[in-house]
Image (spheres, rainbow, N blue to C red):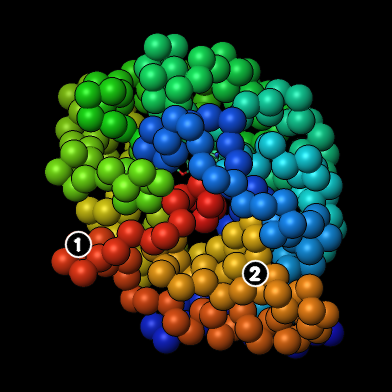
Amino acid sequence: MPHTRPLSDRYGRVATDLRVSLTDRCNLRCSYCMPAEGLDWLPDDSVLTDDEVVRLIRIGVELLGIREVRFTGGEPLVRRGLVDIVRRTHEIDPTVETSLTTNALGLVRVADALAAAGLDRVNVSLDSIRRETFHAITRRDRLQDVLDGLAAARDAGLGPVKVNAVLMRGQNDDQAAELLRWAIAEGYQLRFIEQMPLDAQHVWNREQMVTADEIFERLESEFDLEPAAEPRGSAPAELFRVDGGPATVGVIASVTRPFCGDCDRVRLTADGQVRNCLFAREESDLRTALRAGASDEVIADRWVVAMRGKRAGHGIDDPSFLQPDRPMSAIGG
Ligand code: SAM
Ligand code: SF4
């Protein structure tokens, strides 16, 4: 039996939830994430191969106590080996929960295969159910593909299907209630995420962002919201029962109500760097060790050391806050 060590930091937090970015590329251009022209993508030879990704996940699960693996990007559905990576992850330990954060383009074609490979759930990002607004935010006229992908995920049993929405002032901040009404009717769990300073263009602005308080205001004009009974634990979303339940809505107030003290996450970038926080300014290179023939134990040691430097909080409100060099799409949101 391999010796398991926790991925603990100096503040007593233990990471058990691994976010794996499978690519930095994407087929949408959400304005809060990427510029219209896209980004300089990672060179192919720096991106981990399927075997390398699966090996690092296995080390995380078998040696470091990882209990949940979420695949993300960029857009994970553009990664050719996705279904196989999911299947091999499931085979490492079927009790480890696996999920996918996706824009759902093309999900209609692979939802059944992903479910058969052992994927438990999907989170789909969708900021508007109006075609023009969706087009304006993502710079692509693909709303119907997303709606079809969502339905396919639900039909494939990849639920509860969660929908993540970012509200942008002047673009879709008048559509919060409409989104919630639609999500409840479709049987999706809607969560609003505060916009964070992780855009590649560095145009995020605290005064411009739509805060959790504003989101509540907009929702409470149409719905009755009360805190859901179950404790939040390490989940980032604060959950509210809508009109007495059973439907709920979540708000992820990363900026105005940070939950860093309960964070149980660690991230692996598509090029094999461990990041102990979305907002970390340093990364730990596992790819070089991997390609130099390091043993599982040596890689696990490096990973443990990488977690020790995790900061107490993201510090967005500190005057000294610096946005990380990599944007969200290259870190893995
Ligand atoms: N492409 C996939 C998707 O959109 O779901 C996975 C990667 S995307 C970077 C993951 C999540 O990050 C999405 O829900 C997206 O809305 C969110 N996101 C991207 N940039 C953000 C920002 N600046 N602030 C808050 N959330 C952001
Ligand atoms: Fe692509 Fe997701 Fe970023 Fe939108 S949020 S551009 S779908 S990576």
Of badges 1 and 2, the one in the foreground is 1
Helix, strand or loop for disc 1: loop
Up-down: is 191 above or below 305?
above
| Nearest to the observer: residue 187 or residue 70 | 70
Quarter of the image where one finds residue 164: top left
Q: Is residue 310 left or right of residue 63?
A: left
Where residue 98 appears, x then y in whole percent?
A: 68, 52
Q: Amino acid at mark 2?
A: Ile
Q: Earlier in the sequence, mark 1 or mark 2?
A: 2
Task: Give the total of numbered labels.
Answer: 2
What residue is shown with label 1?
317
Residue at horizontal 79 percent and vertical 57 percent from the top = 49
Residue 132 in view in this figure: yes
| Nearest to the observer: residue 86 or residue 222 | 86
Residue 213 in view in this figure: no
Up-down: is 305 above or below 143?
below
Helix, strand or loop for disc 2: loop
Where residue 156 appears, x then y in whole percent?
A: 73, 29
Q: CA distance from mark 1 to mark 2?
A: 30 Å
What residue is shown with label 2?
66
Residue 163: assigned label: none
Residue at horizontal 59 percent and vertical 83 percent from the top = 304
Task: Pick the quarter of the image with the N terminus.
Answer: bottom right
Up-down: is 150 above or below 55?
above
Where residue 133 appears, x then y in whole percent?
A: 37, 17
Residue at horizontal 28 percent and vertical 43 percent from the top = 203
Where residue 196 appears, x then y in whole percent?
A: 33, 49
Q: Is mark 1 within 8 Å of ligand 1?
A: no
